[in-house]
Amino acid sequence: MSTKIFEAYKKSKRTPNFYGFHSFLDPGCPIKPTGPFRDNVRYFLQQCAELEEYTVEGMQIWSTFLVHKNRGVAIPLYTIEENVKNNDSRSFCDHCRCAGWSHHFVSKRKYHLIIPADCEWNQHLNDGVFDDQTHILHGLIHCNGFGHLICINGNEGGSKFLCGREVMDLWDRICTNLRARKITVEDLSKKHSMDLRLLYGVAYGHTWFGRWDYKFSHGSFGIMEHNYERAIEMLSSIELDQVIEDFRYSSRSNVMKQMVVCYRGLSDAPLITIRDLFRFMLAVKSCNSIKEKPNVAPVVRACSSSRYLIRNASPSKSEGKEKSARYRKFSNIAASLDSRWPVRRLEFTADVIVDALKEKKATNRFGSCGMSRQEARDAARLHIGDTGLIDYVLKSMNNVIVGGYVVRRAVNRATRVLEYTIQELRNCDQSEQEKLPEPVQNYAVNPGTDVYSDVLCLYNNLLLSFAESNVLKLAVRTVLDSKHFVKEWPFRDDPDDILLRFICCILPSSSGLEAVLRKGYPPGEMVEVPLHSTIGDLKTAIESAMRDTYCIMDNFMVTDIVGMETMEDCEVLFGIIESGSELWVRGFGLDLESELKNEGGADNWTVNCRCGARDDDGERMVSCDICEIWQHTRCCGIEDSEVVPPLFVCEACCTSLAPPRAQNSFEYGLYATSLVPCDSEFGMDLIY
């Protein structure tokens, strides 16, 4: 840890908490909480963290320092408590919505656990900390124990001290010790431009996160768990001899054959299938004929969960290589946004903001040329009356090209304020401007020289571009469309403990709750009471837990517990009901008029796509202008690179408005590529 941090603690007469990085939050090290997460996290902050003297957006920050003995560094772990009722802009959770948890009640508090990038360990956290994707670790857990792993960046993500496995081990210990209930992750991790959910799925039968028991949660585009498992089984069971035969008349025949022969010769065990080959290649650490490579960690970047944005996972950057921004034309961004304002209005607003920045730069030639968000907003309001439009455009302006200028958004190191600045385009590195992804290359490799190049060659030539089989292409697409994974910690009840523990759920008949539960039942809450407690004590504990956890339950009162309606409140629980049971309760006092009911928000949108999706899965969607039902743009024949048409009518509405007519061969020849192929053509009956 740097001298700056030591001096800060010396001046404040505080002693920072130091713990071993690799043993922190092992059972009993330093704490062993046994209650629900909402209580355990408070105990953790009280015992293992120190309250900082500054805040982020008015939210308190706690710090814990973890000593990495091998690296000789002290790593800061920050915990930020976010009160949902005090933050209108982040009241609802996009991660919950895309994880299928839209029906969960809105929790009162969120806990962000963050390890910043190496270069920021000596600095205070800034107001943009929640949107920063360069953190070594960023996890979010709601006070009900449900949470999300938002990003993790190991060696390949830019960290000089930590690899991905170490960070994931720490995160897993945190969740286990504090008794989290379910944690999701959206796996967009890449390594050497390879999607790890495909590479590791074929090699090991699970993703990189599967080492920590993260399992399939749900897929995009209507993919179910059995589709995913069948696709993995199909790809991993391809026999190597069949691969050699299939490539026999291809220009890649010699390369593929040499690759298989080379690694079969290096392996003591027989390599029969693609899974055997990939698993052996990934396990190789060093060999006489193979150069040793550093054990680098994958990069996981959380993309926007909005249905309006196109998802792009940037290729990983190698360690030590400077990360450069990619500039995009604002006109292209505006065209891809499904906003309520026309594109020309968005572009005009961007021009007004740039003119204001140019004027500020001209008047302050020797001072700060940046403008804060409020300053830019006020300057634009002189020409535009719609403040919602201005805020919408400002949110999209970062590393964008407007006219002959590049607009950047960054925190001013001196003032700690988020500022917008401009720079003439000719002064920027042209290589940093927006580029189209390069096509897959056919590598002329020398098998056995570089194991990572060999894996990349097999990945590109066999998994991505093996065009001889439409069934395999569909299987690969199925795996790549399966991005959402989850780990669940089952409810634990110690039979030797002196406490009774129950999972308590609210019945939908409680005070008109049916409308709130239209998308499913939210999870119950864990409640603890002493062994000698009465039924009345249990009701009081349930009320306390619900009021402490959910926004709409500040005044919740329990009237009945199912199965105990005829019993008096003074009767002792012991012997009546077994500890660890699930209880259903009725009550009243829920604030059903509050906007903070479900994590998915108050929107009454409906998803009904031809792929089978019935809920938002985070993929790009478009709404029909007649029935207002949302569908995937990809399923409607609109590529991610294409702009959503200003007027869109779904197939069902087209059919209802105009009777179908026979299609001649000329029309079929023009539009056949945009039609959805039948199941048998792509072998979908084998997977689906």
Image: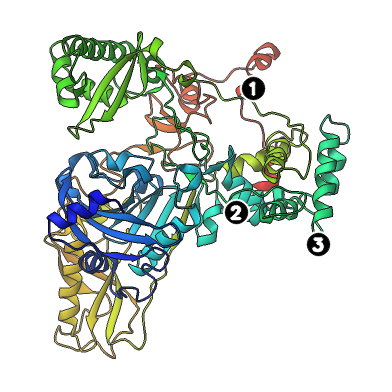
**What label does residue 227 carry, if any?**
none
Picture coordinates of residue 298, whole percent (x, y): 52, 46
Picture coordinates of residue 205, whole percent (x, y): 63, 56
Picture coordinates of residue 392, whole percent (x, y): 26, 24
User: In the rendered view, does 482 fall on the left or right side of 359?
Assistant: right
**What label does residue 268 carry, if any?**
3
For the N terminus, which image quadrant? bottom left
Q: Which residue is mark 2?
A: 226
User: In the rendered view, does 374 fall on the left or right side of 339?
Assistant: left
CB atoms at circles 1 and 2 under 8 Å apart? Answer: no
N-term mark: 3 or 2: 2
In terms of secondary structure, where does tag 1 sit? Answer: helix
Picture coordinates of residue 114, whole percent (x, y): 32, 51
Which one is nearer the viewer's eye here, 76 or 644?
76
Task: Tell me what residue is drawn at x 74 percent, y 32 percent.
Answer: 467
Whether residue 537 can be seen here: yes
Q: Circle 3: is it few (<14), some (14-19), or many (20+) Cα within 10 Å?
A: few
Task: Tell me what residue is drawn at x 66 percent, y 29 percent.
Answer: 440
N-term mark: 1 or 2: 2
Residue 10 found in image quarter: bottom left
Whole-number angstrom distance, CA of label 1 to CA of label 2: 28 Å
Q: Amino acid at mark 2?
A: His
CB atoms at circles 3 and 2 under 8 Å apart? Answer: no
